[in-house]
Image (cartoon, rainbow, N blue to C red):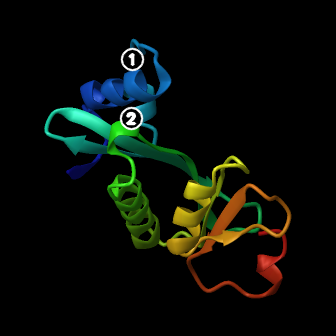
Amino acid sequence: MQIQVLGPGDDRVLQKAVSAFRGIQVSDHAPFLTNPATIALAAMDGPEVIGWAWGTRQRHACGYSQVQLYEIEVSPQHRRRGVGRELLARFLDIVRSEGHRRMWLFTDEANTAAQALYQAAGGEPSLHDDAAFWWQLGNVSPLSRVGG
């Protein structure tokens, strides 16, 4: 398995992921792949996309940058083999290397496997939402943690 960071020109790989995990065809992936806010990864087994993760960089009103991990998914036949863990680790590596202060996501309250993965990777359940997780990545004062 290889984790590929997607960028301009990776339309074919992204389309494989969108087809596999969303079941749709997109005519032009350039706006997504060239958007500087986009972070997108594909887990590859040879030419096959077996997982993906994507999210967006955001500027918080309090002046720091954060990232929302919008989606992480692994094909059913490749689950419980470390694919999701590798996608999440690589995503976090990118976010940390760029100096973002926080990363966050929402998940389904019933998805205990995902919640266990997020907690094992250092995510903290939100104090305000049962289905949200936060990663505190930079120097965060106690006051700035309110609401996170």
| SS state under label 1 | loop
Q: Earlier in the sequence, mark 1 or mark 2?
A: 1
In the image, farthest residue toward the left: 46
Q: Mark 2 points at which residue?
A: 33
Q: Give the x, y percent position of residue 35.
A: 46, 38
| Distance (Cα) linking label 1 and label 2 | 10 Å
Q: Name the residue under label 1.
A: 28
Q: Residues within 10 Å of mark 2 (few under 14, many from 20)?
A: some
Q: Is residue 87 visible?
A: yes
Q: Tag 2: residue type?
A: Leu
Q: How crowded is mark 1: few (under 14 residues within 10 Å), some or many (20 or more)?
A: few
Q: In this view, does 23 lie to the left or right of 144?
A: left
Residue at left offset 44%, top offset 27%: 31
| SS state under label 2 | helix
Residue at left offset 61%, top offset 54%: 58
Q: Is residue 61 left or right of residue 77?
A: right
Q: In which quarter of the image is the C terminus?
A: bottom right
Q: Which of 33 and 124 is in front in this view?
A: 124
Q: Give the x, y percent position of residue 110.
A: 70, 49
In this rendering, is residue 1 above or below 22?
below
Q: Give the x, y percent position of residue 121.
A: 50, 72
Q: Give the x, y percent position of residue 26.
A: 42, 15
Q: Tag 1: residue type?
A: Asp
Q: Quadrant of residue 98?
A: bottom left
Residue at left offset 54%, top offset 69%: 100
Q: Nearer the viewer, residue 62 or 89?
A: 89
